[in-house]
Image (cartoon, rainbow, N blue to C red):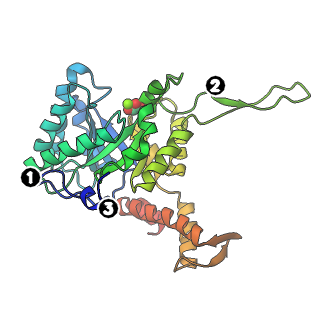
């Protein structure tokens, strides 16, 4: 293990120093764009105004014969637009693919100054992060970049979940991670073809009664364990956890439920793969105005964060003050980007 001082040293001569704290950014939805399709690239200026993060996807869902076009399309869309406060990310191909190296070798010199985050798929352990960390430092140094590019890992293999804590603490370049339910289901041998969400067969059956009445089955959450494990690994390391893709575009209610469970458990955003999912993510990952109002009451009643008070017949103390602060701090970040919600929150 590295010493604390070495942990924060740049990994190449001339590379920018790693961040000590993550930049404060609103990232309620990471919106996926297939950059090889010109019609999709043409929508990027509108998307920038609508979403928190635009991501050019180079990995799965991009056909093998369009990989190079997607990489070049991403460079083109990065050059052609001013992203302002909207994040610019790319999901590169996985480390053992024939495309990963050229993804990095071409993108960083061309548009590294605009790129906030590289999303790395199929991360198995800290060794994958160390490799990308070193490569990014070399490329940043060569390109003369002044700001470090962050790494976001996709948690989508059984091995990755086993090593999630080591992945989270592998580098100061780590931004956070997203749960990838499709690859993870395959890697674990789960018997589902769904991309996220519940499954009707994953249920607990109520006890049989004496009257022979039909027994109720209560559907359970297939992803609870993984989300919880990812949230603890991320938050203990100062990183941001995200839920990934929800594949059934015809079921917005189930998408919303999946996003909401993730939000309540600590996640800060999710992927949007379809325009309708942008609004769902915006709604879910912006704290509820009533909750913000109540949290502000708690903070106002305990200005120094200590003691005990009753508000609306509910006990408040130092710990609930911290809970309230989580909500109000997030609301402030949302308000700084969203004038409508700033007004609703009164912030
Ligand atoms: C995302 O990449 C997934 O595999 O779910
Ligand atoms: Mg995947």
Identify residue for label 3.
21
* Of 68 and 80, the residue lying toward us: 68
Disc 1 CB within 8 Å of nearest ligand 1 atom = no
| First in sequence: mark 2 vs mark 1 | 1
Task: Look at the picture and state if 338 lies above or below 140.
Answer: below
Looking at the rendering, the quadrant in which ligand 2 lies is top left
Q: Residue 42: x and y, percent?
A: 21, 36
Identify residue for label 1.
144
State which quarter of the image contains the C terminus. bottom left
Q: Residue 334: x and y, percent?
A: 40, 59
Q: Does residue 38 appear anywhere in the picture?
A: no
Q: Residue 48: x and y, percent?
A: 27, 47
Quote the CA–CA distance across marks 2 and 3: 43 Å
Say if mark 2 contacts mark 3, CB within 8 Å.
no
Identify residue for label 2.
201
* Of 15 and 83, the residue lying toward us: 15
| First in sequence: mark 2 vs mark 3 | 3
Numbered disc in front, either 2 or 3? 3
Task: Look at the picture and state if 67 lies above or below 321.
Answer: above
The reply, left or right, for residue 199 in relation to residue 52 is right
């Amino acid at each position: 293990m590295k010493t604390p001082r070495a942990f924060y040293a740049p990994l190449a001569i001339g590379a920018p120093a790693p961040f000590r704290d993550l930049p404060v950014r609103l990232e309620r939805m990471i919106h996926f764009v297939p950059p090889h399709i010109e019609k999709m690239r043409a929508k990027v200026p509108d998307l920038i105004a609508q979403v928190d993060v635009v991501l050019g996807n180079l990995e799965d869902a991009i056909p093998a014969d369009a990989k190079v076009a997607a990489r070049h399309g991403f460079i083109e869309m990065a050059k052609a637009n001013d992203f302002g406060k909207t994040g610019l990310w790319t999901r590169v191909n996985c480390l053992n693919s024939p495309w990963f190296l050229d993804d990095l070798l071409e993108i960083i010199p061309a548009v590294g100054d605009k790129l906030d985050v590289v999303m790395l798929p199929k991360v198995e352990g800290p060794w994958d992060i160390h490799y990308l960390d070193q490569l990014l430092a070399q490329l940043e140094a060569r390109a003369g970049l002044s700001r470090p590019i962050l790494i976001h890992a996709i948690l989508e293999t059984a091995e990755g979940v086993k090593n999630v804590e080591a992945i989270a603490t592998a580098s100061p370049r780590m931004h956070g991670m997203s749960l990838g339910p499709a690859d993870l289901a395959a890697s674990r041998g789960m018997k589902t073809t769904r991309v996220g969400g519940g499954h009707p067969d994953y249920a607990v059956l109520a006890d049989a009664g004496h009257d022979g009445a039909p027994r109720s089955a209560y559907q359970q959450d297939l992803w609870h364990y993984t989300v919880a494990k990812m949230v603890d690994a991320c938050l203990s390391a100062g990183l941001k956890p995200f839920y990934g893709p929800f594949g059934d575009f015809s079921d917005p209610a189930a998408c919303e439920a999946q996003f909401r469970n993730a939000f309540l458990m600590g996640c800060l955003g999710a992927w949007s793969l379809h325009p309708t999912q942008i609004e769902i993510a915006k709604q879910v990952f912006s704290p509820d105005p009533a909750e913000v109002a109540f949290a502000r009451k708690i903070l106002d009643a305990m200005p120094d964060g200590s003691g005990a008070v009753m508000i609306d017949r509910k006990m408040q103390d130092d710990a609930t003050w911290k809970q309230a602060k989580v909500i109000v701090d997030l609301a402030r970040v949302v308000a700084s980007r969203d004038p409508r919600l700033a007004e609703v929150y009164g912030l």
